[in-house]
Image: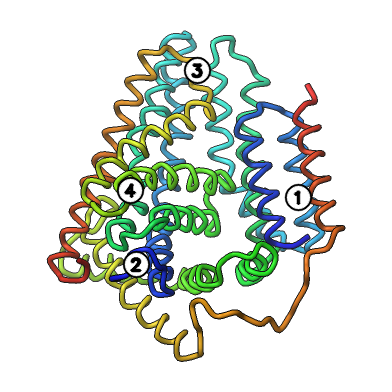
């Protein structure tokens, strides 16, 4: 791992294997996520009667907030691979493999997984690219910012968030950002520190 | 069609589905993907699996978008709900109609991807069942010591990443032992160059999907 720009086969395998780990975990997580969101939404709107406001708020709380709060979990693969390998493209590769693996096992999102993997991977990669892969710690914090912006902008259009109130979308973005900060930022940093303590990474 | 082209086609239609709200595009995608899978003799069990796994999100997103949209429009809810199955069957086309080896080999030969990446990724993807088992083992051994390892505990990730360090080391050593060189030019036993017909097929499918998305 001394020659920084050159990809050796061991680096590719390691980045892809990190993707495989997270892909398996994403799948396990995605199943329960889907069950929660999809069953809770109709139930909540049923229980809250047929008034527009209450059913609207109930389904909003169920779906959008859960999406925003858990988005960081689906972005963990990229930063950790970039921290370990410190190579251009490692975050993107890892995130993409994770999403492909999630699809291969059979998640309920199908091809959407790959699109998400590319969007999130590109967002995370941008942060590390800004530091030219020289300062991974700074790159991690930058990647959280770029990753959350890029993925949220995509989500905004894909799920038609322009139908909602602007203030509400801003609150969602804040939750979105915090989730990525906690999972993709702090948790990945903890993992990296433990690996560093074990002298597995530099 | 070549697996790599198929992959790009599926990806393109997936992007279209994400940005264009069209009921007909969804329906055509589902029917087309189903016919293709039947044509490829994919077992009926896999169809049932897709149907089962997609059912909960299908119902969920129908209700969600029906309640969400201000005018309670049923067509919009149907679009968003059918999209779930459109995505899943498109995913099925990629996953079930070819092996990973065929896909990666096609990426190397037809799209001239760097062989280091192709074989590295292929090697790692073949670890999928082993990794699945390993994560179960890590969780079970944690439980034996009275530690519950959930998705929120860094310990689980650290142990799995440690395993991937070991495996990537072993696999790369094995590949070097079998004569793998990073930047060497490779020769191929089976050569199937990309034909003009396949490229035309690819373009035809893309144009067809655009036309389908324009039907109101």
Q: Chain of mark 2?
A: B
Residue of label 1: B34
Q: Chain of mark 3?
A: A
Q: Position of residue A125 (x, y in %)?
A: 39, 48
Q: Residues within 10 Å of mark 1 (few under 14, many from 20)?
A: some
Seen in the picture, residue A84 relative to B91 is either above or below; the reply is: below
Residue of label 4: A128
Q: Tell us which disc is closer to us: 2 or 3.
A: 3
Q: Residues within 10 Å of mark 3 (few under 14, many from 20)?
A: few
Q: Tell us which disc is closer to us: 2 or 4.
A: 4
Comes first in the chain, label 4 or label 3 = 4
Q: CA distance from mark 4 to mark 3?
A: 30 Å
Residue of label 2: B136
Q: CA distance from mark 4 to mark 1?
A: 41 Å
Residue of label 3: A162
- Asked whether the residues under the numbered discs 1 and 2 touch, taking CB atoms below 8 Å apart as contact, a structural biologist would say no
Q: Chain of mark 1?
A: B
Q: Residues within 10 Å of mark 2 (few under 14, many from 20)?
A: few
- Asked whether the residues under the numbered discs 3 and 1 touch, taking CB atoms below 8 Å apart as contact, a structural biologist would say no
- Local SS, label 4: helix
Q: On the image, which quarter does residue B82 sit in?
A: top right
Badge 4 and badge 1 in a common chain = no
């Amino acid at each position: 791992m001394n020659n920084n720009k050159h990809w050796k086969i061991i680096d590719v395998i390691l980045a892809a294997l990190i993707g495989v780990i997270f892909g398996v975990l994403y799948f396990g997580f995605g199943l329960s996520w889907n069950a929660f969101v999809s069953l809770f939404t109709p139930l909540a709107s049923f229980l809250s009667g047929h008034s527009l406001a209450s059913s609207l708020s109930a389904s909003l709380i169920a779906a959008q907030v859960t999406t925003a709060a858990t988005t960081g979990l689906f972005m963990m693969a990229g930063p950790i691979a970039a921290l370990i390998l410190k190579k251009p493209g490692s975050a993107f590769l890892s995130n993409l493999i994770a999403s492909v693996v999630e699809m291969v096992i059979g998640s309920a999102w199908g091809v959407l997984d790959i699109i998400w993997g590319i969007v999130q991977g590109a967002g995370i990669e941008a942060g590390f690219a800004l530091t030219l892969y020289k300062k991974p710690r700074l790159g991690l914090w930058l990647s959280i910012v770029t990753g959350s912006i890029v993925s949220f902008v995509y989500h905004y259009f894909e799920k038609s968030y322009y139908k909602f109130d602007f203030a509400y979308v801003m609150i969602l973005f804040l939750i979105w950002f915090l989730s990525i900060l906690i999972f993709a930022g702090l948790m990945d940093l903890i993992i990296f520190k433990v690996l560093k303590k074990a002298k597995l990474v530099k | 069609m070549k697996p790599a082209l198929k992959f790009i086609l599926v990806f393109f239609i997936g992007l279209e589905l994400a940005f264009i709200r069209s009921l007909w595009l969804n329906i055509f995608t589902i029917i087309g993907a189903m016919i293709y899978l039947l044509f490829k003799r994919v077992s009926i069990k896999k169809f049932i699996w897709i149907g089962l796994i997609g059912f909960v999100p299908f119902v969920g997103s129908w209700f969600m978008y029906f309640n969400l949209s201000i005018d309670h429009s049923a067509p919009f809810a149907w679009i968003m709900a059918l999209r779930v199955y459109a995505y899943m069957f498109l995913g099925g086309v990629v996953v079930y109609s070819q092996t990973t080896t065929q896909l990666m080999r096609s990426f190397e030969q037809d799209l001239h991807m760097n062989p280091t990446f192709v074989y590295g990724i292929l090697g790692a993807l073949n670890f999928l069942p082993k990794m699945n088992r390993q994560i179960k083992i890590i969780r079970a051994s944690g439980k034996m010591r009275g530690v519950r390892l959930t998705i929120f505990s860094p310990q689980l990730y650290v142990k799995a990443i440690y395993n991937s360090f070991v495996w990537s080391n072993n696999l790369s050593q094995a590949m070097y032992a079998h004569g793998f060189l990073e930047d060497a030019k490779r020769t191929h036993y089976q050569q199937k160059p990309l034909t003009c017909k396949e490229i035309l097929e690819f373009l035809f499918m893309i144009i067809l999907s655009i036309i389908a998305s324009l039907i109101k």
